[in-house]
Amino acid sequence: MADEQLREQPKDFIKPLELQKKPSIWPKIIVICIVFFMVAWVVAGFSTDIFSGKAKLPKNAFQIGGYTFYTLEDGTFGTYTAIGQQKIPIAFRLDPRKAGDIPFFESVLGTILNSEKVYITFDPDNPKERGKLAVAAAEISRITSLYQIETTAAFTHDTNPIEPKIPIRSCGNAKAGVSIIELRFSDRIYIGVDQSDNRCIVVEAPTGDDLILAADKLGMNLVGIRV
């Protein structure tokens, strides 16, 4: 794959979601990003013909794990991967050269990819971090949408006042065909399964920014990028 990637830089990466200043948009954020990324995926599918022919590696490019990544102007890192017959340009916030620092258990991949429905959930009682939690959830949902897995935003418990449009889901709701991905604050960075139910995926990190990077690590692995 490394030889194939020595091509002109793609122009249309599926970009990470912008950080939002108003956490109140959370009820709409997942739906919006899924629609956006599905459209971007179609655009990206048509843009991959720019990889035909040989070209020198651009100055903003580097290789790791058999992949060529491009450092983009907004500070994200673009590459491309394949979903079925489609070559898909995609960008991440996580620097792939640092991705190996985040522990990851590959058993989560089969659980998610074999699901018919995924809920991405978190504790809403942290208003200062809710915007970043929403972005972390959106980073994962843009990947599950590529596999056409129905993905829904959720809270682990009701807010006060209640937000009736947001379902309540936690690890106890995981079952065959339905996976729960719970975003949690912790003193460690961890992507694995909950000890009580191996259908529940947990993504843990100390801060909202770290959770976004951990979500990117999960996303990279879901599209087959092992770095």
Image (cartoon, rainbow, N blue to C red):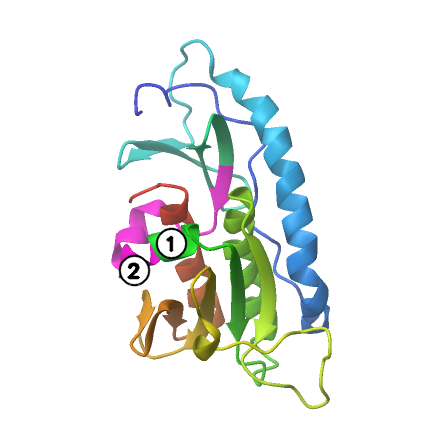
Determine the residue positioned at 71% across, 86% down: 162
In this view of the protein, which residue sits in the foreground, 105 or 80?
105
The residue carrying mark 1 is 217
Residue 173: percent from left, percent from top: 48, 75
Above or below, comparing residue 150 to residue 120 in the picture: above
**Residue extending furthest toward the bottom:** 160
**Residue extending furthest toward the top:** 53
The quadrant where residue 43 appears: top right
Determine the residue positioned at 63% across, 41% down: 38
User: Label 2 is placed on what type of residue?
Assistant: Ile
User: Label 1 is placed on what type of residue?
Assistant: Lys
Task: Left or right? Give the position of 160 relative to 94.
Answer: right
Residue 97 located within the stretch drawn in magenta: yes
Whole-angstrom CA distance, mark 2 to mark 1, is 7 Å
Question: In which quadrant will I find the N terminus?
Answer: top left
The residue carrying mark 2 is 102
Which mark is first along the chain, 1 or 2?
2
**Residue extending furthest toward the front:** 176
Residue 40: percent from left, percent from top: 63, 37
Magenta span: 90-109
Do the residues under discs 2 and 1 have CB atoms within 8 angstroms? Answer: yes
Question: In which quadrant will I find the C terminus?
Answer: top left
Numbered disc 1: secondary structure: helix
Determine the residue positioned at 40% across, 48% down: 222
Determine the residue positioned at 46% across, 59% down: 177
Task: Left or right? Give the position of 29 relative to 77.
Answer: right
